[in-house]
Image (tube, helix red, strand yellow):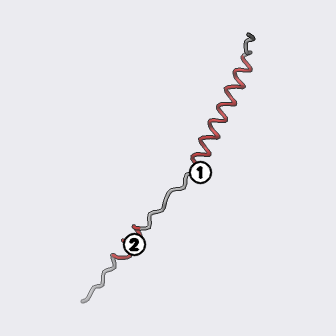
Amino acid sequence: MPQMSPMMWFSLFIMFSIMMIMFNQMNFFSYKPVKIKSIKKMMKKNNMNWKW
């Protein structure tokens, strides 16, 4: 069974590192947070009419 040279191990490490970084970036940038609209509705209800 042939052995791998150190440069082959290094290139394999670089390849998997790049793949891991790309996968993590894709997961990070594909996430879209859900906007909460109930906070805006609560702020609109908080109108105060002062009668002096």
Mark 1 residue element: helix
Q: Nearer the viewer, residue 8 or 50?
A: 8
Which quadrant would residue 52 be assigned to in this image? Answer: bottom left
Residue 30 lies, with reference to residue 22, above or below; the image says: below
Crowd rating for badge 1 (residues with CA inside 10 Å; few <14, some 14–19, many 20+): few
> Mark 1 or mark 2, which is nearer the start of the sequence?
1
Q: Position of residue 46 (x, y in %)?
A: 33, 75
Q: Disc 2 vs disc 1: Cβ atoms closer than 8 Å?
A: no
Q: Nearer the viewer, residue 34 or 14?
A: 34
Q: Amino acid at mark 2?
A: Lys
Q: Amino acid at mark 1?
A: Ser
Q: What number is the disc on residue 9?
A: none
Q: Position of residue 10 (x, y in %)?
A: 70, 23
Which residue is located at x 58 percent, y 45 percent? Answer: 27
Q: Nearer the viewer, residue 37 or 6?
A: 37
Which residue is located at x 34 percent, y 79 percent? Answer: 47
Q: Position of residue 44 (x, y in %)?
A: 38, 76
Report whether 44 appears left or right of 17.
Answer: left
Q: Badge 2 is on which residue?
A: 41
Q: Badge 1 is on which residue?
A: 30
Which residue is located at x 59 percent, y 50 percent? Answer: 29
